[in-house]
Structures are given as C-alpha cells and as structure tokens.
Amino acid sequence: MFICNAALRNKEMRANCSSSSACPANSSEEELPVGLEVYGNLELVFTVVSAVMIGLLMFSLGCSVEIRRLWSHIRRPWGIAVGLLCQFGLMPLTAYLLVISFSLKPVQAMAILIMGCCPGGTISNIFTYWVDGDMDLSISMTTCSTVVALGVMPLCLYLYTLSWNLEQNLTIPYQNIGITLVCLTIPVAFGVYVNYRWPKQSKIILKVGAIVGGVLLLVVAVAGVVLAKGSWNSDIIPLTISFIFPLIGHVTGFLLALLTHQSWQSCRTISLETGAQNIQMCITMLHLSFTAEQLVQMLSFPLAYGLFQLLDGFLIVAAYKMYKRTLKIKHRIKNPALRVEARFKKKSTSPKETSAFLEVNEEAALTPGPSGPMDLHRAVMPTGQISCAK
C-alpha cells in the first residue's frame, strides 16, 4: 500500500512539475522513487515482521497475566495513570523541547513531535518480561495508551503546533490504532484464558514466546540496519535526537514513577513503557499527512528511533541481569547460610519459587531505611526458619 500510494503521488508531482516553472531544474525523476522504494521495502518488512511479532508476543505474554492482578490494576489504576502521564505528558513535551533546542527544519520537527505523541509500542512488553517487571501493568498500559491516543494524540499535536502555521492538515491513523487494539486484546485474551485453564502449559508457552520474541527483535534490528543504511548518511541532528529521545523517556519515566511511590517492579515497567513508542503508527501518520518529497526527509527519524529503542532495551535488560547476579552474589557472601539454602532450593523448589526468592532478596536490599544484618537475614530466610532465627 505504501509503495502504490507513493508511486501515485510521484506521478502527480511529475505532472505538476511538467506544467509549472516552480520546480527546480536540477531535480531528477529517479532520485525520489529510489528513496521511496527503499523506505517502502523497509516498511513492508517491518509490517510483516511486527504483525507476526505482535501476535506471538501478546499471546505468549498474555499467558503471564493473572485475572486477579489485572483487575486490581483496573480497579485502582494509579500505576496506569502515572504511565499515561509519562506517555502523553512527558514524551510530547520532551519532543517539543528537543525540536526547539536543536532548531530543526519544520519537516524534521514534525516527525519528532509526531513520534513523541504516539502511544506506547508492544516492544516494551517483552522487555518488561525480561527485567521481571509487572506484566499486568505493562499490558494494561499498552492497551490503555492506545485507546487514549484516539483523543489525546490529536489534542497534543494541536497544542504543540499552534504557532507553527502548518500548510497541510495532519491525519490521525484511526484505522491503524484500531488494528493495533485488535492485535493487542485478542491474543492477550487467549493467553489469559490459557493461563487460567492450563497454568503449567502457559509457563512453557511464555518461555518459548520470550525466546521467539527476542529472535524477531533481532531480525527487525538487522533488517532495519541493512535496508536503512542509506539514511545513516543524512543529517546528523535527527539521528542524534533519535538516540537520546528514548533514553530521556526511560529515565524520566523511571523518576516520575519513583516520585509517585510506585514499587520497584512498577518503576521498571513504567520506564520501559515510556521510552518505547509505536513506530508503525508514526510511519503511517507521516505517510497519510505529507507528500512523497517530504517523506524522504522525514522517514529516517522514526526508523532510527526504532533501532535505537531496541538497542536501549537490550542494554537495560543486560544491565538488570548483571545487577541481579551481583545482588545474588553479594547476599551469598554476607550470609554463608544462604549458599546451603541455594543448593537445597535448586534441587527442591520450582522455578516460580526460585524467582520469588530472588525478588524477595531484591526488595529487601532496595527497601529504604536502616536494616541490620539480622533483619536482612530474616528478610531473605524462608518463613519456616524465622522462628529459629529469633
């Protein structure tokens, strides 16, 4: 669809240029279609891969959702409210400040602002799973931000572009938003049902889905680097912004969640949800709102943003895994008795209990306030041994 519409626009532009003296004399009819063909191929790859990725990921990640916890987030949506404030408050404001700070051209500025006003992407769900985040909150935030985008996204764009005097009207991709909602809710609903009926099988599906999701993310990254290699020679300022923009989203999202007294698990979740944007929706909106000549200058930013948010996600996951391993070693050094416990648990406990045991260690180490060695030892000991410690 992208290539066909671009070709129609090219024909219209060549027809207008043939009857007008305003077109530059040195313009080539072959340069524009070649550039658009690269972006068309790239969008086709991203569309097919992301469709498969969304279906698999949301079904497998839905297998980790518990109806009771999901309902608790909906009944008391404090975490969802903080996430929406980050998504549609911090991100559009950050985009606007970056545009003003770097004094970008209007075309490039619009691409960055549209990216900042887009809802969260499903890529954050898989990264949330890898950092032991709150999957119920993550999926709730992704779904709610997509629904809220129907009204808040055009409102943000209107407010931030009041003084820009745009020549063309922006087209909100409502159809794309609807398709995203369907791709979110239906696979997740099946996953929740599988987790409710067959909890043991759902754990296997969850692990397989996480591995497949990681492979698909690598495929997207490699395809983006190969097919968009021509865009890396473009203006360095948009590329710089595409690198720092998701980082600012992750940091500010984490800090705001921390200031609102969210749990450490929720802070990690909100941080990842804030920095991860819906790239496909941004590209679709650019395609619907701007001419073919403008698209060549604009599409390099969302593609670069998508690649850098993948890189940032992998770095955050790697840093969390290293931190978790360091924390585990530190607890074993401080408490020699835990070495024997760890060996015993490795043989006798299930993976779920072991994960809960590690999470208790993490929460005990990160809980503010003074705690002595005995308090820490009692915090990480099983319930049945607390009486012995007393």
Image (cartoon, grey):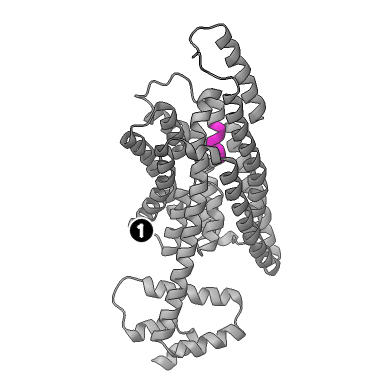
Coordinates of residue 43 in the picture (x, y in percent):
61, 37
At horizontal 44% and vertical 59% (from top left) the residue drawn is 268
Q: Is residue 11 above or below residue 107?
A: above
Q: What is the span of residues highlighted in magenta in the rendered image? A: 280-285
Q: Is residue 132 above or below residue 7?
A: below
At horizontal 46% and vertical 59% (from top left) the residue drawn is 316
Residue 264 location, quadrant: bottom left
**Magenta residue check for 60:** no
At horizontal 42% and vertical 81% (from top left) the residue drawn is 331
Q: Which residue is mark 1?
A: 258
Q: Nearer the viewer, residue 367 or 293?
A: 293
| Outermost residue toward the bottom in this view | 388
**Magenta residue check for 284:** yes
Q: Is residue 74 visible?
A: no
Q: Nearer the viewer, residue 185 or 26?
A: 26
Side (left or right) of 212 relative to 22: right
Quarter of the image with the N terminus is: top right
Quarter of the image with the C terminus is: bottom left
| Outermost residue toward the front in this view | 26
Q: Secondary structure at mark 1?
A: helix
Coordinates of residue 85 in the picture (x, y in percent):
40, 45
Which three-letter amino acid code belongs to the residue tagged 1?
Leu
Total marks in image = 1
Coordinates of residue 51 in the picture (x, y in percent):
66, 45
At horizontal 45% and vertical 78% (from top left) the residue drawn is 328
Side (left or right) of 204 relative to 375: right
